[in-house]
Image: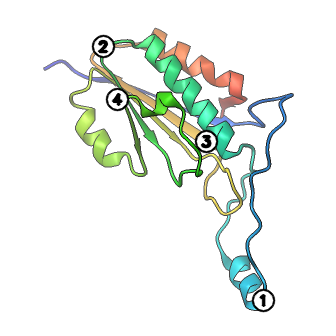
């Protein structure tokens, strides 16, 4: 059996991803009415990272990345995306393609698929989309394949810059 090659890249969402474009504030007010409600809310965990995107923008980024990956690896590509708490919105068509798996915990599938898929691309982000979400606005991308695919992986990673995602 051939040795599998894995490449990793971790980057940071540096600012708003769609500059000069209006962005909907999709945060909702919590139905807090009593002193007890406010006390409970104050104790809930929250991230110290800034909220730089909303659910719509998050799906736009994932859509663009999936489309770009399918261009670069048109044959035998499986894309595994960690997606937590759906935003109550319709997913872009690209995220519903047969070669895309959306999961809350990608680890079990990663173990299975990394041995067999021709090219396995994983996208695992922790972008903060609302006040109570935990994360640090980072994205980790990995590619596992039978051959060393440095050039195409570099091309894929370069697509992150258009969304204000860069080196940590």
Q: Which mark is residue 98?
A: 4
Say if 2 sits above or below 17 in the image.
above
Q: Which mark is residue 34?
A: 1
Q: Are marks 2 and 1 in contact (CB under 8 Å)?
A: no
Disc 4/disc 1 C-alpha distance (Å): 47 Å
Q: Earlier along the polypeptide chain: callout 2 or callout 4?
A: 4
**Which residue is identified by label 3?**
138
Q: Position of residue 110 (x, y in %)?
A: 31, 40
Q: Earlier along the polypeptide chain: callout 2 or callout 3?
A: 3
Q: Are marks 2 and 3 in contact (CB under 8 Å)?
A: no
Q: Of tags 2 and 1, which is closer to the observer?
A: 1
- What is the secondary structure assignment of the residue under circle 4? loop
Q: Position of residue 25 (x, y in %)?
A: 79, 49
Say if 51 sits above or below 157 in the image.
below
Q: Earlier along the polypeptide chain: callout 4 or callout 1?
A: 1
Residue lying farthest top?
A: 151
Disc 3/disc 1 C-alpha distance (Å): 36 Å
Crowding at label 1, few (<14), some or many (≥20) Cα neighbours within 10 Å?
Answer: few
Q: Position of residue 52 (x, y in %)?
A: 75, 44
Q: Position of residue 90 (x, y in %)?
A: 56, 41
Disc 2/disc 4 C-alpha distance (Å): 23 Å
Residue lying farthest left?
A: 1
Q: Quadrant of residue 39?
A: bottom right
Q: Earlier along the polypeptide chain: callout 2 or callout 1?
A: 1
**Which residue is identified by label 2?**
147
Q: Quadrant of residue 78?
A: top left
Q: Of tags 3 and 1, which is closer to the observer?
A: 1
Question: In this view of the protein, which residue sits in the foreground, 73 or 12?
Answer: 73
Residue 143 horizontal side relative to residue 145, left or right: right
């Amino acid at each position: 059996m051939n040795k599998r090659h894995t490449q990793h890249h971790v980057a940071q969402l540096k600012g708003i991803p769609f500059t000069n474009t209006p962005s909907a504030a999709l945060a909702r007010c919590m139905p807090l009415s009593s002193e007890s409600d406010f006390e409970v809310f104050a104790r809930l965990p929250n991230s110290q990272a800034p909220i730089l995107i909303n659910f719509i923008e998050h799906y736009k980024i994932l859509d663009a990345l999936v489309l770009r990956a399918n261009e670069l690896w048109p044959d035998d590509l499986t894309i595994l995306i960690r997606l937590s708490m759906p935003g109550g919105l319709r997913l872009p068509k690209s995220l519903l393609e047969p070669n895309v798996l959306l999961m809350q915990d990608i680890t079990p599938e990663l173990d299975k698929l990394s041995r067999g898929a021709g090219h396995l691309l994983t996208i695992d982000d922790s972008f903060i989309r609302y006040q109570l979400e935990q994360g640090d606005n980072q994205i980790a991308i990995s590619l596992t394949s039978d051959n060393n695919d440095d050039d195409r992986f570099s091309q894929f990673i370069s697509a992150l810059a258009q969304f204000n995602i860069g080196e940590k």
